[in-house]
Image: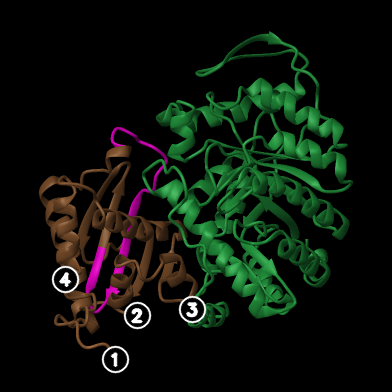
Chain colours: A brown, B green
């Protein structure tokens, strides 16, 4: 599985990945990092630290820098990353859409990991946060729901038009 | 290589009845393991991690099985040592009592807790957990050895006190700590204590952890307690005569175990109620892929799942990495008791003897 060499910008899954990471990367550049989840604000707990690469075949390479409660998203790979996670864009989107569990992908070899195995949990966190955003309740959850719809807009199969029952 | 069993006391969709049955089933499993020559069991301490771990009073379970077994080592894997969970004197007393009653069969693992669920429930001073663990680790072994113990530390001040009883193992029960990354394995090695390591990652990563741990532990000169040079790894396991059946149930169990662990430890929340994790069997095509991937060169050696031939192959990879003990997680939340029993028996009769002389 490789990243840049197989890039196909027209691929809906690749477009979804780029749509997902575009704003986190920009926000990280402007703010230094992404705001932490509300539950962990003010907590310097024994979480993960260091960098992890996410190489998504057909959709580019990304990395995340973890410092205490803070996470920053960046484009490209970090040479000093503690782990590198490799997977296909279509599988990543299937995870975001709730059709493929991270654990299943790992067991079946659709996700490959080198380095610190614990960093694989970061992928699970990413997917869980996205799924939580998809079902964020009420008016306050609308921006999150809209963002996830935008990310997955071309990646999910469209419902078939209603027709005569066969 | 030595083989033990790991107990989180996992249970999917518990009811009061199934939860009570779980504890009785686990006793039966441990009795079988004792008869088959397993080295021991390791019992966790967690609080409020519904479905993932119902083992909140491990000292009670270990005492109970001490009376029902003859040879098994009884491991605390681990006791939570920060101030909010257990006072060090109570830890020293309980472990010593269990050591006496079991005839010197206790291994003592210690740790600090890293789940927001239990940290918040006990009002843990989260930034100080690591320092509290270190201080407790220094003083508990002294309590076991000194006639009159006193201590003035950062978190505990104890006037001259006779901590009784004393353990029967001399100078004290072997000491271990939980670790999962190379840097934490090195820290545990530097302290001169045994490493209890979750099996996450590929063979090379595991080998690096073991190597770095060995270097650190060999150079360690612990003061106040005896050195333990021992590296244990904790894979999910299910060994049945039929490879496909083992994979069906074992991989479902591994998925439940991994996802529920991730939910409590990396979810950033304090989940309540039914965990949002996979409980169903893998789809047939996924199962085929997972079975095939077990033998791939970069497949992580984290699940000892399959028939005895497959299990021997996977265990050999842990041996090659330099691991001393495999603490097998057969009791995963979705694996029925009858299959856990069959797995303990199959592994104990068909796999364990092949490696018993390697350690």
Q: What residue is disc 2 on?
A: A1
- The residue lying furthest to the front in this view is A165
Which quarter of the rendered picture does the C terminus of chain B lie within? Answer: bottom right
Would residue B77 appear left or right of B35 to someone viewing this image? left
Q: Is residue A60 magenta?
A: yes
Mark 4, chain letter? A
Mark 3, chain letter? B
As drawn, the label of residue A166 is: 1
Observer able to see residue B266: yes
Residue at coordinates 69% horizontally, 49% vertically from top-left?
B22
Report the span colored magenta. A40-62
Circles 3 and 4 on the same subunit: no
Estimate the spatial distance between the alpha carbons at disc 3 and disc 4, rounded to whole Å: 27 Å
Estimate the spatial distance between the alpha carbons at disc 1 and disc 2, rounded to whole Å: 41 Å
Q: What residue is disc 3 on?
A: B286
Estimate the spatial distance between the alpha carbons at disc 4 and disc 2, rounded to whole Å: 25 Å
Q: What residue is disc 4 on?
A: A153
Residue at coordinates 19% horizontally, 49% vertically from top-left?
A141
Whether A128 is drawn above or below A159: the answer is above
């Amino acid at each position: 599985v490789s990243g840049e060499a197989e890039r196909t910008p027209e691929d809906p899954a690749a477009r979804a990945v780029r749509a997902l990471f575009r704003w986190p990367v920009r926000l990280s550049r402007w703010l230094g990092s992404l705001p932490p989840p509300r539950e962990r604000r003010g907590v310097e707990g024994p979480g993960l630290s260091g960098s992890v690469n996410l190489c998504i075949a057909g959709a580019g390479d990304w990395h995340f820098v973890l410092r205490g409660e803070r996470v920053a998203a960046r484009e490209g790979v970090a040479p000093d990353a503690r782990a590198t996670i490799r997977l296909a864009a279509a599988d990543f989107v299937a995870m975001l859409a709730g059709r493929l569990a991270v654990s299943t992908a790992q067991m079946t070899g659709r996700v490959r990991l080198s380095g610190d195995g614990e960093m694989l949990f970061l992928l699970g966190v990413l997917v869980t946060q996205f799924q939580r955003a998809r079902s964020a309740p009420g008016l306050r959850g609308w921006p999150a729901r809209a963002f996830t719809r935008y990310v997955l807009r071309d990646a999910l199969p469209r419902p078939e038009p209603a027709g005569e029952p066969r | 290589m030595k083989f033990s069993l790991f107990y989180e006391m996992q249970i999917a969709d518990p009811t009061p009845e199934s939860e009570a049955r779980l504890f009785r089933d686990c006793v039966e499993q441990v009795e079988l393991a004792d008869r088959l020559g397993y080295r021991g069991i390791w019992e966790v301490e967690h609080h409020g991690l519904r479905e993932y771990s119902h083992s909140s009073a491990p000292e009670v379970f270990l005492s109970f099985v001490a009376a029902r077994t003859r040879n098994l080592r009884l491991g605390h894997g681990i006791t939570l040592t920060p101030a909010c969970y257990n006072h060090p004197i109570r830890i020293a007393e309980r472990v010593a009592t269990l050591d006496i009653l079991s005839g010197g069969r206790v291994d003592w693992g210690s740790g600090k807790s890293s789940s927001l669920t239990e940290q918040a429930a006990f009002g843990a001073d989260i930034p100080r957990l690591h320092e509290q663990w270190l201080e407790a680790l220094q003083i508990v072994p002294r309590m076991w050895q000194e006639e009159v113990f006193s201590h003035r530390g950062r978190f505990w001040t104890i006037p001259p006190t006779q901590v009784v009883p004393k353990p029967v193992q001399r100078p004290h029960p072997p000491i271990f700590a939980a670790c999962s990354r190379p840097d934490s394995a090195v820290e545990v090695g530097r302290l001169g204590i045994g490493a209890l390591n979750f099996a996450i990652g590929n063979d090379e990563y595991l080998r690096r952890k073991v190597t770095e741990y060995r270097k650190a532990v060999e150079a360690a000169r612990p003061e106040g307690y005896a050195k333990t040079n021992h590296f244990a790894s904790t894979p999910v396991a299910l060994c049945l005569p039929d490879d496909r059946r083992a994979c069906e149930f074992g991989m479902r169990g591994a998925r439940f175990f991994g996802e529920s662990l991730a939910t409590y430890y990396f979810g950033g929340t304090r989940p309540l109620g039914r965990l949002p994790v996979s409980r169903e069997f893998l789809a047939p095509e996924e199962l085929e892929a997972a079975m095939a991937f077990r033998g791939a060169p970069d497949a992580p050696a984290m699940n000892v799942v399959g028939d005895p031939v497959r299990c021997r192959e996977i265990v050999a990879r842990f041996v090659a990495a330099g691991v001393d003990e495999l603490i097998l997680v057969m009791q995963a939340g979705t694996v029925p008791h009858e299959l856990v029993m069959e797995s303990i028996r199959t592994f104990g009769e068909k796999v364990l003897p092949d490696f018993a002389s390697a350690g």
